[in-house]
Amino acid sequence: MAHVSLPHDAKAGPTKPEVRAVLLSKLDLEPTDHFAEVGSCTGAVTVEAARRAGRVTALERKPERVETSRKNLAANDAADNVELRESEAPEGLPTDADALFLGGSRNYEAVLDHAVEHRVDRVVMNVSRLEVAGAATEAFRERGLLDEVVQFQVSHGYELAGATSFDSENPVYMLVGGAKEAAADGGERRTDSRRSPSRGVDGGQR
Ligand SMILES: C[S@@+](CC[C@H](N)C(=O)[O-])C[C@H]1O[C@@H](n2cnc3c(N)ncnc32)[C@H](O)[C@@H]1O
């Protein structure tokens, strides 16, 4: 994975490189995709998405963090296909996104409603707080958006007395899914979705 340079920082973020690697595999972005992001903050995810998707619309509610995103995008020469919006989602979300990432959780239920209404093919949300993770999992499930819940924790080794010990980062809960296409008969189909088949949370193969 190409390096992301973040000379400008923010109080929250960045999403760590290993977490971004998993996130990007779930989002499966391609040059034809319009990617929408809630909470660009340092722009670390925005930069990676801009290298893969054709278009990126990135929202951030805090003006100083919009500026941080803007500067870090420029530092990575990744601003050409990115529209940064100072906005609190769902306000300002595009209606034609193929993939949506919620890096910020404010108003997430309304953001998920937007994803359902506009049939966003891939929806991923990262959560670090346990209580929010549980509530957000329910919100995905209630809307028929949930394919899988992934929980992982990254640790980095460091040398200690000639051996290797580890510093652990906070666990991450990654909620992964997307809106299903409505079929003419009122059922649901997944014909043009790029979501990879995975074992659903109900235990069935999806
Ligand atoms: C944990 S940080 C995201 C980190 C980011 N992925 C990065 O790599 O720097 C969450 C960000 O989401 C923003 N945020 C939270 N809810 C939002 C919403 N509804 N709309 C826009 N921004 C939001 C916060 O201001 C914060 O900057």
Image (cartoon, rainbow, N blue to C red):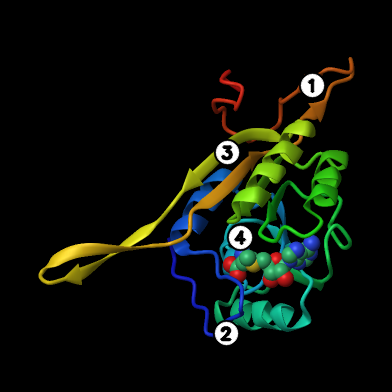
Mark closest to the chain's N terminus, 3 or 2: 2
Camera-near label (4 vs 1) is 1
Label 3 to label 4, Cα distance in Å?
Answer: 21 Å
User: Where does the image place residue 136, in percent across and percent down from the top left?
Assistant: 70, 45
Q: Is residue 83 above or below residue 201?
A: below
Mark closest to the chain's N terminus, 4 or 1: 4
Q: Classify mark 3 as within 8 Å of ligand 1 or not, answering yes or no.
A: no
Identity of the amino acid at label 4? Ala
Camera-near label (3 vs 2) is 3
Q: Which mark is residue 49?
A: 4
Mark closest to the chain's N terminus, 3 or 1: 3
Q: Classify mark 2 as within 8 Å of ligand 1 or not, answering yes or no.
A: no
Please name whichever residue, 153 or 184, is drawn nearer the observer in this view of the structure.
153
Q: Tell me what residue is drawn at x 89 percent, y 61 percent.
A: 91
Label 1 to label 2, Cα distance in Å?
Answer: 44 Å
User: Where does the image place residue 81, in percent across and percent down from the top left?
Assistant: 70, 67
Q: Which mark is residue 188?
A: 1
